Image (cartoon, rainbow, N blue to C red):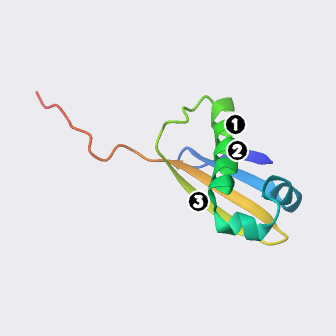
């Protein structure tokens, strides 16, 4: 697994073909996004975020792209608070 920072506070996680098969069994299982697959993703994300000092409870946009026999790329983007109130003096 390779973890790298990309622009705008985004984090890119790359899993090789071997790592995808090791973590999820098959690409078909990965594509199914069952509860057990979601839990495996949560564990990966929790480990990455914890090592970077980011709270696991922060809102994040998670994009997952996987292609059979190639691997998987996960992009994590922080979601900014949309309904922030501003105090004007």
- Marks 3 and 1 sit apart, C-alpha to C-alpha, by 17 Å
Position of residue 42 measured from the top left corner of the image (x, y, whole percent): 63, 45
- Which residue is at a point 85% across and 71% down the rendered structure image? 69
Front one among 89 and 27: 27
- Marks 3 and 2 sit apart, C-alpha to C-alpha, by 14 Å
**Label 1: element kind:** helix
Front one among 11 and 67: 67
Direction from residue 80 to residue 4 in the image, left or right = right
**Label 3: element kind:** strand
- Which residue is at a point 80% across and 53% down the rendered structure image? 23
Label for residue 44? 2
Position of residue 89 measured from the top left corner of the image (x, y, whole percent): 10, 27
- Marks 1 and 2 sit apart, C-alpha to C-alpha, by 5 Å
Question: Outermost residue toward the right?
Answer: 18
Direction from residue 63 to residue 21 in the image, left or right = right
**Label 2: element kind:** helix
Direction from residue 6 to residue 77 in the image, left or right = left
Label for residue 63? 3
Label for residue 89? none
Question: Outermost residue toward the left?
Answer: 89
Q: Mark 1 points at which residue?
A: 47
- Determine whether 60 is above or below 47 in the image: below
Marks 1/2 in contact by CB < 8 Å: the verdict is yes
**Label 3 crowd bin: few (<14), some (14–19), many (20+), radius 10 Å:** few
Sequence-first tag of 3 and 1: 1
Front one among 79 and 29: 29
Position of residue 70 measured from the top left corner of the image (x, y, whole percent): 82, 68
């Amino acid at each position: 697994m390779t973890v790298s920072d990309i622009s705008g506070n985004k984090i890119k996680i790359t899993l090789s073909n071997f790592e995808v098969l090791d973590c999820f069994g098959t690409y078909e299982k990965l594509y199914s996004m069952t509860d057990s697959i979601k839990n495996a993703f949560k564990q990966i994300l929790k480990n990455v975020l914890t090592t970077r000092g980011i709270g696991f409870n922060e809102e994040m946009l998670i994009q997952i792209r996987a292609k059979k026999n190639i691997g998987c790329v996960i992009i994590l983007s922080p979601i900014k608070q949309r309904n922030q109130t501003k105090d004007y003096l």
